[in-house]
Image: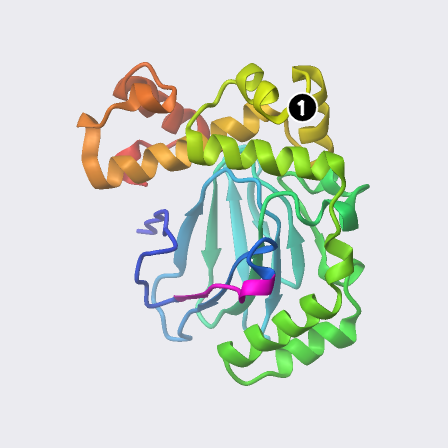
Amino acid sequence: MLISKVIYEDEVNDHVRIKYPGFELRDIVEYYFEITTESNLITPFSIVALPNVNIVASVNLTDKSQTLKVDRKLGIKDTTGDKLYGSLSDAMTIIHAPGTHEFAIKFKPGVLYPFLKDDIPCLLDSYKPLSNYIDNTIIEELKSKKTFDERVSYAENYLLSNIDIFKSDYKLETVIKAVYYITHCGDFKSNMVSKKVGVSTPTLNRYFKEVLGMSPKQCFRTMRFKIALMNYRSKGSSNSYDELGYTDFSHFAKESQCLTNKKPSEL
């Protein structure tokens, strides 16, 4: 039986390695990660990707690599290949077949907006070939590196040499401030956040859709759920869920079913 769980960044897992960016890229890259599954695995390695507002660039490092995404509405889809994945408004199960070796960069919310302006909306819950955005010679050079540390070093140097593509504008700065506010202050009401960042609620809504591909309400909902799920894992159902914008634990559990089709205990 295939069991899929959420794996958080601070959890130890035999198949996943994570490395955080250097100081110069701390505001651009969330982290680098690599997934490796042995060729003799009997059961594929499967994880649940929670709804999120990140864009991920991913490359396959071997010909045996195969990745499948299970969408509860659209079914199973083969997403093998070098891809740029957009934000997720719904949870998705990701299956890594035996023999898969994949390197990826998880970018911070919105930072690719100056580079991807026209593609942000169509990347939501979808992906495009990475070669649409990066020359194939760069991708192949990355694949030629022998170790995870070498791949991270090459990726860092490439990003630093192209740092100009991450120049922000007023829209991006406003969205980043709003995301920071709800992450650190726990206020998930759009009208309150818009006041904090100095724009009207309709303007904040427009900025979010342009920069992240989703509305503030969708964004807040996904971020609130991740925080609540982390709290559930550490404190259980007795935690004060009203402080996270839920009426009670039952409300949080219903949200879990709505966003992931699973109970919190199954994640």
- 198 and 25: which is toward the camera: 198
Instruction: Reply above or below: 267 against 228.
Output: below
> Which quarter of the figure has residue 36?
bottom left
- Residue type of the residue flagged with mark 1: Leu
Instruction: Reply above or below: 45 against 247.
Output: below
User: In the shown orientation, is residue 263 left or right of residue 100?
Assistant: left
> Which quarter of the figure has residue 135?
bottom right
What is the number of callouts on the image? 1
User: In the shown orientation, is residue 184 left or right of residue 123?
Assistant: left
Q: Which residue is mark 1?
A: 204
Chain part drawn in magenta: 16-24
User: In the shown orientation, is residue 5 left or right of residue 142?
Assistant: left
Residue 147 in sight in this render: yes
Residue at 22%, 28% in the rendered image: 239
Q: Position of residue 242 (x, y in %)?
A: 31, 18
Residue at 67%, 30% in the rendered image: 208
Residue 156 lies in the magenta-colored region: no
Residue 17 lies in the magenta-colored region: yes
> How many other residues sit within 10 Å of disc 1, few (<14), some (14-19) or many (≥20)?
many
